[in-house]
Image (cartoon, grey):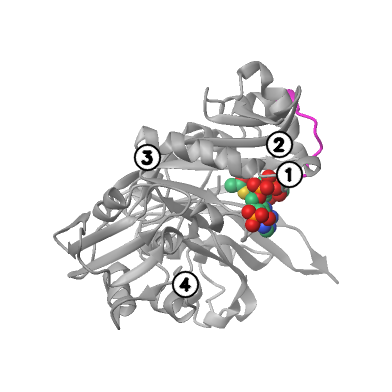
Amino acid sequence: MIDVRPVAEDEFDNWHRALDTGFLQDPVLLPEQRAARLRQFQPGRLLGAFDGARCVGTFRSFAQEVTAPGGAYVPSNAISNVTVSPTHRRRGLLTRMMREDLAAARERGDVIATLIAAEYPIYGKHGFGPATWATNWTVDVGRSGLDPRWAGPEDGARIDLVDGAEVRALGPKLSERVRAVTPGAIGRDELWWDARTGVARFGRDWTEPFYAVYRSASGEAEGLVAYRCEAKWEGQQPDNAAKVEWLTAATPAAETALWRYLCSIDWIAHVKSGWRAPDSLLPLLLPDARAARVETHTDWLWLRLLDVVRALEARSYERSGSLVLEVLDEDGTAGGRYRLEASPEGASCTPAGGASAELTLPVAELATVWLGDGSLARLAALGRVQEEREGAARAADALFRTSVRPWCPDSF
Ligand SMILES: CC(=O)SCCNC(=O)CCNC(=O)[C@H](O)C(C)(C)COP(=O)(O)OP(=O)(O)OC[C@H]1O[C@@H](n2cnc3c(N)ncnc32)[C@H](O)[C@@H]1OP(=O)(O)O
């Protein structure tokens, strides 16, 4: 019999060995990695599956806030570090850990649960759906049409190279400003900044990247980028790439200037954008937008609605309308018939009682449109959403869609 239960702090190494095993990492924890990892330890939020003394399954959740359209921070149960050892797979251990964790999240009053899925087929059966997408571009600088003589912003703004200490001083305030207006964004805690500046070491061989800050004419830090160089010379010609680790910009001017900066660095022939919003400014700020080639376009933040009423009321709507939804939740308690009355002034979601549903949909499909992305008309065409009234899927799309696509800049 496998025991699924919370992990005590003195079992952490045993748990971590199983985590490394599941993620195919060498199961050796260096002291500084251990110290960083232990900072994530929260009693009750680390689950383990134990076969006798040996940990064979891992699961971690933690408190998170996700920005909804309109800027509300919605309490989320973020899930990470999910593994089951290859010796114990497909016996329902993930299912047991997930059920236990989601039940606790509902009990706490979390509105949603979130995760980044390692593989697409794992989490749909637990009620999760992909709610934000990300795109990764490589810019061919020589083809971009950008003026190679660029020497910095000309409007009184400036770009400066900074070190990790300055990033830590400037970054949190800037990030807070950005996440308030970025549906799908999540908070960055102190550990996030420590890990990005080498104070906390999750990997084995961290070295400092280059950091550059954009300051507007008023002196306000409005953009930060961390990047590394992938060195390559061919026949005495530089063919190096600037690889962006993260880029945070609070204004279009800051974002444009930072991409412009990266594309102007001598010896840099390519800029690898890292994961960006699918409707990022990047390709269109190049005179030749095709010089930004899409490397990958992928699902990113997966969501599970735990409380449909609070989730639908927490976000804003760009249009007015009402809708009766029959939400199906086989593996949870979010199912039911709900009436959503929404307008740019606010929304109410109430049990719909005996009113006829206009749209019947699994809770996972509702999650895919909650942040303003996705298409219920597309899901109806696939038979994954049922229209009880003709045209209801399009009407629902008109209500849920947002003019800017949601984006989660971070992984966890
Ligand atoms: C948020 C994150 O941490 S993402 C990281 C997820 N972890 C990994 O990918 C590491 C490698 N993989 C693993 O450790 C394991 O295979 C896990 C954790 C994904 C699954 O654990 P298991 O205990 O085998 O899952 P469990 O037995 O509960 O499976 C439940 C169902 O999901 C399905 N399933 C689970 N994993 C997968 C997968 N990778 N691909 C397709 N189906 C899957 C099972 O087939 C099963 O389906 P069924 O109910 O129709 O029979």
Q: Which residue is mark 4?
A: 384
| Residue at the extreme front | 354
Nearer to me, 223 or 389: 389
Nearer to me, 291 or 145: 291
Q: Calculate the distance from the C-alpha at mark 3 to the C-alpha at mark 1.
A: 28 Å
Q: Calculate the distance from the C-alpha at mark 2 to the C-alpha at mark 4.
A: 34 Å
Q: Calculate the distance from the C-alpha at mark 1 to the C-alpha at mark 2.
A: 6 Å
**What numbered label is drawn on residue 110?**
3
Q: Which residues are magenta?
A: 24-32
Residue 262 part of the magenta-drawn span: no
Is residue 290 something one can see in this rendering? Answer: yes
Which numbered disc, 3 or 1, marks the residue that appears first in the sequence? 1
Which amino acid does the dot numbered 1 rest on?
Phe
Cβ–Cβ under 8 Å for marks 1 and 2: yes
Main SS of residues in magenta: loop
Label 4's element? loop
- Could you tell me residue 250's position as x and y percent? 37, 54
